[in-house]
Image: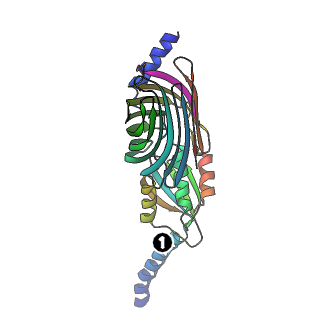
Amino acid sequence: MKILNRLLPLTLAVLVLGAGFATTAEARSLRMEVNGLVCAFCADGITKAFKKEPAAGDVFVSLEDRLVAVDLKDGQDMSDAAVTKLLTDAGYKVVRIQRSDATVAEIKAELSRE
Amino acid sequence: MNVYLTRGLQALALCALSLPAFARPVSYAGGHMFMADHLPDMDALSYTYSPSARWSASVGALRVDQLARSGRLDLDYVRASRLLHRWNLPSAQANAFGWVGLGNARTESGSGLGRHVGVQLDYETRRIYTSFVSELHEGVGYSNRFDTAAIGWAPYAHDVDRVATWIVLKGQRSSGAIDDSVKPSAVLRLFTTRWWLEVGADGDGRPVANVMLNL
């Protein structure tokens, strides 16, 4: 019984951490809040920059929502540092980076309903 | 009516902090821009390549008529432009650009090296646009400074999948022109991710136009 009591917290910790890693590993897209998005040329430059990244799939830019969303290819990811550098080099300021289980198509559909 | 319209356009243009008769001189990394500009006393063609979002290199040709000292200026040039600073705000963007250029200048006084230097300041949201451009040209027998102020208003906030529509008022002055007063113009500007088109008229009803392709 003592052994069980000792193992239980450890088991729970492993499960919680495991779930966290799984969420990161299973992220299907990146959602970035970006400052300075005011024109179609801005969106075009950002789209072309992400298209050069091996991990990036579809790209969606919404000026209205100050949002850049990028599909991640299966099993691939981009670090926050890499994303920040890409957008900074493109001339914009990154406010927030989130990983999402939704695809770019789903994000677009969600925004169009709002 | 025409007098009031002209004075109104002049006042608005002069009050604008503003910007261009030109698009931004630096595009995004890997961007190619082709531009053609027509004003009653000026025509310009240029090609610009931006290796990064900070720098660009251009080649172009410029013709300016009605200059006081040289009559007409024809200039073929190369130019380097730099994004000096960008302010990225939540729903706005402001920029400061600078550029220098050299080329072959031909006037009624002769031909030789022509040099120019310019600055551009702009502030833009999805509904309001202002800019100011100043460019100094010097060479054999001529020295002219071109100043352009512009203010624009968009009737709706565009997004990437829609054509952006702007109504832009400009005031332009050439210090070396026979008539060096501020010349107003009003244009309708349409643009998407790939192209930009401006058409309108100056205060005397003469056509002005600007076309840009972005690849």
Q: Residue at x 57, y 21 (%)?
A: B206
Q: In this view, does B91 lie above or below A105?
A: above
Q: Quadrant of the N terminus of chain A?
A: bottom left
* Residue B126 is at least partly visible in this image: no
Q: Where is residue B2 in the image (x, y as percent from the top left)?
A: 52, 11
Answer few, some or many: residues within 10 Å of disc 1's Cα (few below 14, many 20 plus, some between 14 and 19).
few
Q: Name the residue under label 1.
A: A20
**Which kind of residue does numbered mark 1 sit on?**
Gly
> In the rendered picture of this protein, how many numbered marks are placed on residues?
1
Front-most of A22 and B197?
Answer: B197
In the image, the segment drawn in magenta is B181-189
- Is A58 magenta? The answer is no
Most extreme residue toward the front, as rendered?
B110
In this picture, residue B19 sits left or right of residue B191:
left
The chain that hosts pointer 1 is A
The image's colouring method is rainbow
Specify the principal SS of the magenta part: strand
